[in-house]
Image (cartoon, rainbow, N blue to C red):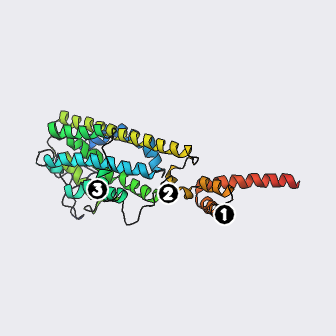
Amino acid sequence: MDSNSISEPKSNGVKKGGVRIIVDDNDEGLSPTDLSEMLAEGTKESHDRAENCQFVKDFLRGRIIKDVFKRATAALYFVYSAMEEEIEKNKDHPHIAPIYFPVELHRREALARDLEYFYGANWESQISLSAGTKPYVDRIHEVGEADPVLLVAHSYTRYMGDLSGGQILKKVAQRALKLPASGEGLNFYQFEGITSHRGFKQLYRSRMNELELDPEAKQRIVDESNRAFGFNMMVFSELEEIGNTIKEEVQEQGFGHGHAELIQKDDFNKCPYYAAKMAANGNPTYALQLAKTLVGHLPCQVALAAWVAIFAGFTAWYLL
């Protein structure tokens, strides 16, 4: 590839590069045989499947159970620990050195801070590698040991997502879980070493495209990236099952409803259905809580409007 076709950004304050899954439409000088283009095109279906799995769809709608979010953070910690351990071991490898940006990209320490926020100082004794995450971690160690060029695929798949869609997930999680505006619990999504995501990803992509790889090696990287998406979906499926189990347990206790984002430890008084139940039992505090919640919660506003309409109908019928 002609080194003049993509130049490194001069004004974004970044000396090393970053990545992102989505290739900008206005990039010039790219060829269909460039690795970044092959990855974007070759992983499109996997990317769509991952985005449309139930766990991700629920997440984007703000239907987040705090315990599941904590487990997801732990799963990411094990994945990034494995990936960054192997990247460190292979940082002088000819296919890894050009895309080695630990200060800008590495997430292990950020995830450790998030886990300390959620679990406390002894967080390491409270988390473990889950059955759904273990195959992903094992595969990363396997390629790091036997075929380091495939680490390019794992780096691409994870870091690109973090710098694009991950920023959306950060806002959703912060709002749904009522996390502090200062960023505690969300350090994973904060790339303090990057001043321009756009400039950073362009630089990373240019470095990736300059790797000396034959067509077969490029295709193997695309295949491994699709495999990485599959591992991520395994983790999502496991988290979805855990979330469903938690919701079933809550329903068995008599507090069941479809708004999983409200189901958090010591937070049942914020649930309109629970408040309604307590108000019906004559508790004025919960009657007030119910009124406040109904006014502020869109689905309940719709339900309230329906109740008012039904009541008005019965009243009109009676008066007639």
User: With 265 as the anchor, is 102 left or right in this view?
Assistant: left
Query: Dividing the picture into quarters, in which one does residue 146 lie?
Result: top left
Q: Secondary structure at mark 3?
A: helix
Q: Nearer the viewer, mark 2 or mark 3?
A: 2
User: With 263 as the anchor, is 230 left or right in this view?
Assistant: left
Q: Position of residue 191 (x, y in %)?
A: 29, 59
Query: What's the amino acid at mark 3?
Result: Ala
Q: Are marks 3 and 1 in contact (CB under 8 Å)?
A: no
Say which mark, if any, is on residue 112.
3
Query: What's the amino acid at mark 2?
Result: Asp
Between marks 2 and 3, how big is the CA–CA gap? 25 Å
Query: Dividing the picture into quarters, in which one does residue 280 lie?
Result: bottom right
Query: Which residue is found at the position 57% from the left and 49% from the top?
Result: 255
Query: Dividing the picture into quarters, in which one does residue 184 lie?
Result: bottom left
Say which mark, if any, is on residue 310.
none
Question: Are there few (<14), some (14-19), or many (20+) residues within 10 Å of tag 3?
Answer: many
Name the N-terminal-most of marks 2 and 3.
3
Please identify the residue farthest to the top as the structure is shown: 216
Residue for badge 2: 266
Q: Position of residue 79 (x, y in %)?
A: 27, 45
Between marks 3 and 1, how big is the CA–CA gap? 43 Å
Name the N-terminal-most of marks 3 and 1.
3
Q: Nearer the viewer, mark 3 or mark 1?
A: 1
Name the N-terminal-most of marks 1 and 2.
2
Residue for badge 1: 284
Q: Position of residue 309 (x, y in %)?
A: 74, 53
Please identify the residue farthest to the bottom as the structure is shown: 182
Instruction: From the viewer's side, name the closer residue of 185 and 190.
Output: 185
Please identify the residue farthest to the right as the structure is shown: 320
Query: What's the amino acid at mark 1?
Result: Pro
Between marks 1 and 2, how big is the CA–CA gap? 20 Å
Q: Secondary structure at mark 2?
A: loop
